[in-house]
Image (cartoon, rainbow, N blue to C red):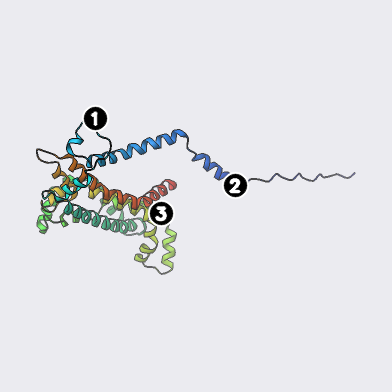
C-alpha cells in the first residue's frame, strides 16, 4: 500500500511589513475635524496679541482709547516710528544697538562655554567632576535679584560701571546651559564614537569640534534661542547698571511709559519694534528648535 502525499497548497502572498507600518502610522497621525478646530483656535489666540499690537502701533493715542475699539490697522505706523526714533529722551536706536550687542555676545559665549563644559562633564573622566557639576547646579538655585548689590560693587571695583561690559560679563557663564548640554551630550554622543576617534589619533579638541559639536547642534540652537530672548528682555540689571545715555531696549521702553502722560501709540510702536528681532531669531532657529524637541521626544 502506497501513501499518497498531497502537495501543499501555495501560501497567499504576504503584504510587506513596511506597508503595515506605513498604514499604522497614517492611522496614528490622522487628524479629526476636532483636531483641526483646536489647531485653528490656538493659532488665532497666539497670533492675536501680535496683530493687536500692530493695530495700536498704527493708530493715534485718541483712536486707541475710543469705544468701541478699532480692530483694523491705521495709517500712522510710519509717523509713530519716526516720533519714536526722534525722541531724544528715549534714544531708541542706541537702545536697539546696545541690546543687539549685549544679547548677541552673551548668546555666542554661553553656547560655546556650555558646549565645552557639557562635553567635559558628560564624556571626560577627571577628579572632582561630580562635585563641580553639583556646584554648577547649585548656581541655578540662587535668585538673580540677590546678586544685584554684589555685582554692582564688583563692577564698580573693576571700573567699568555704566558700560555695556557691566551687563555682559556677569552672564557669560550659565549653569542651566552647562547642565542642559551635559544631559544632551550624555545621550546624543555614544562613547564608542569618541573611542573610535581617539583610536584614529584625534585630540580632545578635534573630537569636540568634529564629532561632539555637530551632534549637539539641536541643543545648542535651543540654548542660544532662549539665552538671546532672556537677555534681550532683561530689565532689572541693565536698569541698575547702565548709565541713562547708554540704555537697552527694555530700559528705553520703560521711559516711554513714565511721566504723567503716556502716549500709548508710541509705547506700542516701540514694543512692536522690540519684538521684531525676536521673531526673526525664532524663524531662523525654528527648524533646529523643532528638531531638538522631536529628537528628545523620540529618545524618551
Residue visible at 29% across and 59% down in the picture:
112
Position of residue 282 in the picture relative to residue 172 (left or right): right
The label on residue 233 is none
Determine whether the residue tagged by mark 3 lies in a helix, strand or loop: helix
280 or 54, which is in the foreground? 54
**Disc 2, SS:** helix
Q: Residues within 10 Å of mark 3 (few under 14, many from 20)?
A: some
Q: Nearer the viewer, mark 3 or mark 1?
A: 1
Residue identified by numbered label 1 = 68
| Mark 3 / mark 1, whichever is N-terminal | 1
- The residue carrying mark 3 is 188
Relative depth, front residue between 92 and 164: 92
Q: Depth-wise, is mark 1 or mark 2 nearer the camera? A: 1
Residue 262, horizontal then vertical, whole percent: 13, 39
Q: Which mark is residue 17?
A: 2
Residue 219 seen in the current view: yes
Residue 170 in sight here: no
Instruction: Provide the secondary structure element on which disc 1 rests.
Output: loop
**Is there a contact, CB below 8 Å, between mark 3 and mark 2?**
no
On the image, which quarter does residue 216 sit in?
A: bottom left
Amino acid at each position: 500500500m502506497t501513501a499518497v502525499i498531497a502537495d501543499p497548497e501555495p501560501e497567499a502572498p504576504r503584504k510587506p511589513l513596511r506597508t503595515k507600518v506605513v498604514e499604522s502610522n497614517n492611522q496614528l497621525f490622522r487628524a479629526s475635524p476636532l483636531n483641526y478646530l483646536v489647531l485653528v483656535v490656538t493659532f488665532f489666540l497666539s497670533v492675536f496679541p501680535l496683530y493687536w499690537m500692530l493695530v495700536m502701533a498704527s493708530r493715534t493715542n485718541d483712536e486707541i482709547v475710543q469705544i468701541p475699539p478699532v480692530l483694523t490697522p491705521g495709517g500712522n505706523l510710519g509717523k509713530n516710528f519716526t516720533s519714536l526714533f526722534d525722541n531724544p529722551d528715549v534714544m531708541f536706536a542706541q537702545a536697539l544697538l546696545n541690546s543687539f550687542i549685549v544679547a548677541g555676545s552673551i548668546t555666542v559665549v554661553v553656547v560655546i562655554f556650555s558646549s565645552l563644559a557639557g562635553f567635559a562633564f558628560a564624556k571626560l573622566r577627571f577628579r572632582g567632576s561630580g562635585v563641580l557639576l553639583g556646584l554648577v547646579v547649585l548656581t541655578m538655585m540662587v535668585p538673580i535679584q540677590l546678586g544685584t548689590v554684589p555685582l554692582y560693587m564688583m563692577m564698580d571695583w573693576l571700573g567699568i560701571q555704566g558700560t555695556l561690559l557691566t551687563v555682559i560679563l556677569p552672564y557669560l557663564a550659565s549653569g542651566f546651559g552647562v547642565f542642559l548640554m551635559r544631559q544632551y551630550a550624555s545621550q546624543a554622543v555614544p562613547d564608542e564614537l569618541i573611542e573610535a576617534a581617539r583610536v584614529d589619533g584625534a585630540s580632545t579638541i578635534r573630537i569636540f569640534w568634529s564629532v561632539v559639536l555637530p551632534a549637539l547642534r539641536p541643543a545648542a540652537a535651543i540654548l542660544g534661542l532662549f539665552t538671546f530672548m532672556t537677555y534681550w528682555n532683561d530689565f532689572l540689571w541693565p536698569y541698575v547698571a547702565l548709565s541713562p545715555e547708554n540704555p537697552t531696549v527694555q530700559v528705553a521702553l520703560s521711559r516711554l511709559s513714565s511721566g504723567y502722560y503716556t502716549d500709548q501709540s508710541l509705547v506700542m510702536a516701540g514694543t512692536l519694534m522690540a519684538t521684531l528681532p525676536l521673531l526673526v531669531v525664532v524663524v531662523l532657529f525654528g527648524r533646529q528648535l523643532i528638531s531638538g524637541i522631536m529628537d528628545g521626544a523620540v529618545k524618551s
